[in-house]
Amino acid sequence: MASLLGEKLFEISGQGPAPSKDFYHFVIARNEVMLNMWTISLRRENKYRPPKQLKSTFSDFLLDKQLHNIFGEKILDYSLSLCQGKYDYLDRIPDEILLRIISFLQLKERFVLAQVSKRFRMLCNSEKFWELLVKNDCPDYHSDMEDLGKAMGWKMTYFTFFHSDDTNNNGINNHFNFNSNRRNSASINGTQKQ
């Protein structure tokens, strides 16, 4: 699991709270914490001032609460957790491995997983996810459908050809069929709604 940890555990940058215009860049590395600060001022004497860089060990950082004023409570809590060795390994797993893990879940469970975080939502709605789903989970799939999947999109291919109406996934299937029927009727009438 240690191989999932990169050299930088966390990195964020942004402008300080109003009325300050100062810019901050915060990095948590494996053994130290760095905070870079650029003073933004209209005064001439501050024009060529180099950025300040504060480096500290994890133990020193745990005592410093300055980050709360800059990035807020959530970032401070997350940073403190990282400094205490509480790593979120699930967030660091490569997409290919997560897609492989997700492939063992049922479709209903995959839709629930998509609600867990922004990353899972992006993964579960990605074309790669739907391509793997069609190729691995659909018994009627054959290699001639490759071009169709690329043209229509793998998600639409799945719900059009492989997901039957008689299965009920808490209205998920009905929602997708409703959208595809609306698109089909719009294209038959020659109108495109945007």
Image (cartoon, helix red, strand yellow):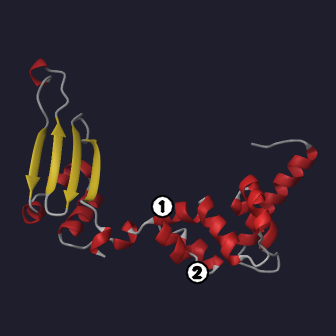
Pinpoint residue 170: horizontal percent, then vertical percent. 70, 77
Three-letter code for the amino acid on which mark 2 is drawn: Leu
Residue 142 visible, this orientation: yes
Q: Which residue is mark 2?
A: 105
Tell me which amino acid carries mark 1. Answer: Lys
Asked whether 117 or 20 is in front, the reply is: 117
- Please give left or right for residue 35 compared with residue 164 in the image: left
Contact check, label 2 and label 1, Cβ < 8 Å = no
Exactly how many numbered labels are in the figure?
A: 2
Q: Which mark is residue 42?
A: none
Whole-Å distance between the Cαs marked 2 and 1? 18 Å
Q: Give the structural element (helix, strand or loop) at label 1.
A: helix
- Identify whether 113 is placed above or below 126: below
Viewer-nearest of discs 2 and 1? 2
**Residue 82 location (% of width, % of height):** 23, 67
Quarter of the image with the C terminus is: top right
User: In the rendered image, is residue 176 in sight?
Assistant: no
Name the residue located 20 percent from the left edge and 59 percent from the top edge: 29
Q: Which mark is residue 118?
A: 1
Residue lying at 23% horizontally and 62% vertically, measured from the top left:
79
Residue 53 falls in image quadrant: top left
From the top left corner, tell me how far across and down residue 101 is, in percent. Answer: 51, 77
Instruction: Residue at 14% x, 63% y: name it.
Output: 31
